[in-house]
């Protein structure tokens, strides 16, 4: 936890947080915090700043704070990922928030097992908790919106064109003819990543018809979660 | 499993494998394999090629094969990672092999918990099994050597200079003054990544004195495993 995120529910008085949940445990067990320690805090959806621990017990922490710093810029990327198995989904949710993507779309594809759509990870509150873990890691306060698209064809035909407005669309696909994946994000991007086993030819064709260019990271087939972080890692720069 | 890896112990007759362990389970449960199916096979440390399932039962598979293809080129990178907690270590071992690093060095640092060195993941056979999972994923046969360096100072003073011969050394460290992490691997690299919480100033100084240049991926603090895949992902190209 590099940033203690809070919402209005955590406010005692103005400029004062009262914390008694797992964040308190983390302060005790990981930070080994003491009264007087300073800690980075951020309001979910708002600014970040410095907090100071004014009271600390096994039952609660009182933290006074001032917010004076906007969150870091987002990576100008809409990330589309074919819904992965739950274990991998948790890591991808955290990573998408951690790397600062603008928006995440989880979509269906032929090789997505139907049961994956039943996972409790997709419940609003669980999904949000994984995104918050990513924001806490990389010190950001802005939750990326997550959209679930349970049907491939209507999504690609009806809604993908809207997402692609003023945006370069890329399809990660290890085809020998594909261009290199980009190494900067000077223009807004949309990046689509397939399921384990890859897209089927019909899906590749549909996505290309919608305007996505095929890009590759070379002959090595990466696990989906590693393809996500490898592709996003190429777009990071010291400036943003 | 995009590649069925085997060793001499799996050879029945020349050009014929006999498989009866978890790889057999994988053929049944994931590949839903049948007699006559073809499958990519590779000899650990050797060539890769096409196999064909000649016999298949609950007890064993007989696979005939021919090896005609060398493994893919390695990324010209020696990866140094401060020993992470076991759960993260497993993923980093898989990823290091999957991305094709030449060599992996796990080393001690002030913020590495002593207990991490006791993990059974570091047993030779367990460590090897995680590396093999990475090779199976990205279709490679060459296990990267893994070195354990339990003492920071003797490692940095006595052995790091040898690793740095004819190699550019980089230290991933989110300092505001750091240069951008490289986006190609035209020259051999050595890449050092710190523990959760980062290197302490003394360690940064020692590593810089040894010749490592500080590089950054920007202000976002990434989890160690994501820093590894983000940095390696920048070095991948369609050609290698």
Image: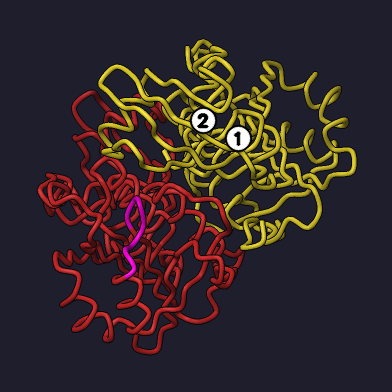
Chain colours: A red, B yellow
Residue drawn at (78%, 49%) of the image: B213
Residue drawn at (26%, 38%) of the image: B32
Residue B199 x, y percent position in the rendering: 63, 35
Predominant secondary structure, magenta span: loop
Total number of numbered labels?
2
Q: What span is colored magenta in the figure?
A: A195-201
Q: Which chain carries label 2?
A: B
Quickly name the residue at label 2.
B5
Tags 1 and 2 touching, CB below 8 Å: yes
Q: Mark 1 lies on which chain?
A: B
View extreme (bottom): residue: A166
**Which residue occupies the foreground of this view, B60 or A215?**
B60
Residue B152 x, y percent position in the rendering: 72, 22
Quickly name the residue at label 1.
B141
**Which residue occupies the foreground of this view, B88 or A117?**
A117
To the question of a shared chain for discs 1 and 2, the answer is yes
Confirm whether residue A12 shows in the render: no
Q: Say left or right for B4 vs B148.
A: left
């Amino acid at each position: 936890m590099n940033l203690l995120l809070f919402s209005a529910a955590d406010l005692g008085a103005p400029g004062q947080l009262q914390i008694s949940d797992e964040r308190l445990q983390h302060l005790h067990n990981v930070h080994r915090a003491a009264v007087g320690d300073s800690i980075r805090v951020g309001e979910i959806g708002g600014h970040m700043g410095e907090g100071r621990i004014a009271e600390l017990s096994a039952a609660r922490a009182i933290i006074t704070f001032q917010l004076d710093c906007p969150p870091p810029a987002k990576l100008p990327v809409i990330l589309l990922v074919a819904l992965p198995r739950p274990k991998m989904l948790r890591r991808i949710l955290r990573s998408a928030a951690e790397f600062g993507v603008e928006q995440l779309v989880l979509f269906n594809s032929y090789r997505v097992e139907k049961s994956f759509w039943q996972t409790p990870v997709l419940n609003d509150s669980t999904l949000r908790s994984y995104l918050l873990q990513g924001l806490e890691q990389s010190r950001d306060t802005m939750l990326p919106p997550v959209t679930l698209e349970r049907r491939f064809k209507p999504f690609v035909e009806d809604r993908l064109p809207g997402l692609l407005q003023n945006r370069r669309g890329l399809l990660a696909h290890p085809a020998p003819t594909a261009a290199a994946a980009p190494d900067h994000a000077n223009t807004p991007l949309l990046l689509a990543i397939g399921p384990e086993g890859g897209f089927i030819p019909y899906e590749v064709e549909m996505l290309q018809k919608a305007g996505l260019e095929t890009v590759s990271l070379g002959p090595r087939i990466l696990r989906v979660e590693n393809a996500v972080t490898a592709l996003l890692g190429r777009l990071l720069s010291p400036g943003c």
